[in-house]
Image (cartoon, coloured by chain):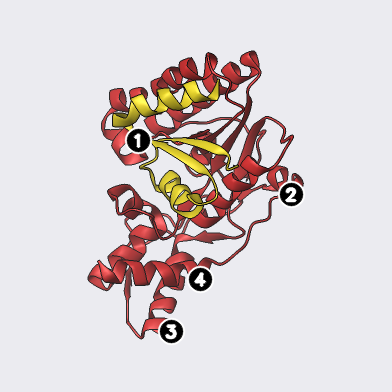
Chain colours: A red, B yellow
Amino acid sequence: MIYSVALDAAQSADNNLKSKKVNYEAVKVFCKYLKSNEVKKVIKLSTIKVYGKNPNFSLSEKSKFNPEDNYSKHILKSDMYLEKFCNKNKINFQILRVSNGFGVPAIKTKESSRVLVNSFVYQASLLKKIYISSQFNMVKNFIRIENIVDCIDFLIKKQNVPNGVYLLAGKSNYDLASIVRLIKKTFKKEFNKEIIIDYNFNKKKLNKNFKIENNKIKKIGFNFIKKDKQEIIKLIKYYSKI
Amino acid sequence: MKKKVLVVGAAGFLASKFISKYKDKYRIISSIKSKKKKILNFLKEQK
């Protein structure tokens, strides 16, 4: 089973009660149904935001929690509930804490155009301009959505995967300026289109030491493939059609 | 025989991508709120 129920961070910030219901309490209902049935394995999608919005250190599965908003607070509670439940009832489980996913969505939703890289490409396709409101040039990790779903497939097929939490992150980190420059460059090189970039960052670097350790999932045999530029090209084509 | 996979929250960004990519490989039962009955039936089948 794959459990991927969540209300995104923006909507969760606007409505604490709804966030609690969707991001946390729904897992209790799900577990009730698991209990009386012989489900072999549960894969739950989660977020690295449970360790903080912009941590300035190297993250691993053992890092200290620091949920800073409704979304990460409730997702963390649901992860912990599921973990306890599965351990108690001897159900295999893996919780995947994912960084910032991006890529061509299977269905058009507001959620998919709100994820960071998608939203930059969407803006650029629509307005020929990318505006970043952040005051700081934060370092982020981006992972292609294809990598995430391939990892789920890997975990379904693979026998004897240890239970627990696994971090999923892309091969490279980018600061915000670098990722929008890559998008701008791709628009120019592949589509001969000029894009204006608009940001005004404070000089202070807040999280230059940010890094994500992917070793746990790599050790059980999953390989991450870096095709960030190719995914951006696909995204440009996708949003240019809309 | 194809493995059965139940996807809860199937309309989301990640889950819908998984379904779209692997729909031929697995017997996928996807659920959104309105398909609660389908999930229960799926769980019964697991017994």
Q: Is residue A199 visible?
A: no
Query: With respect to residue A138, does A82 lie above or below?
Result: above
Earlier in the chain: of badge 4 and badge 3, it is: 3
Q: Residue at x 37, y 82 (%)?
A: A191
Q: Which residue is mark 4?
A: A229
Which numbered disc covers residue A221? Answer: 2
Q: Residue at x 29, y 22 (%)?
A: A17
Q: Residue at x 42, y 82 (%)?
A: A190
Q: CA distance from mark 2 to mark 4?
A: 25 Å
Earlier in the chain: of badge 4 and badge 1, it is: 1
Q: Residues within 10 Å of mark 4 (few under 14, many from 20)?
A: few
Q: Residues within 10 Å of mark 1 (few under 14, many from 20)?
A: many
Q: Which residue is mark 1?
A: A7
Which residue type carries mark 1?
Answer: Leu
Earlier in the chain: of badge 3 and badge 1, it is: 1
Q: CA distance from mark 1 to mark 2?
A: 31 Å
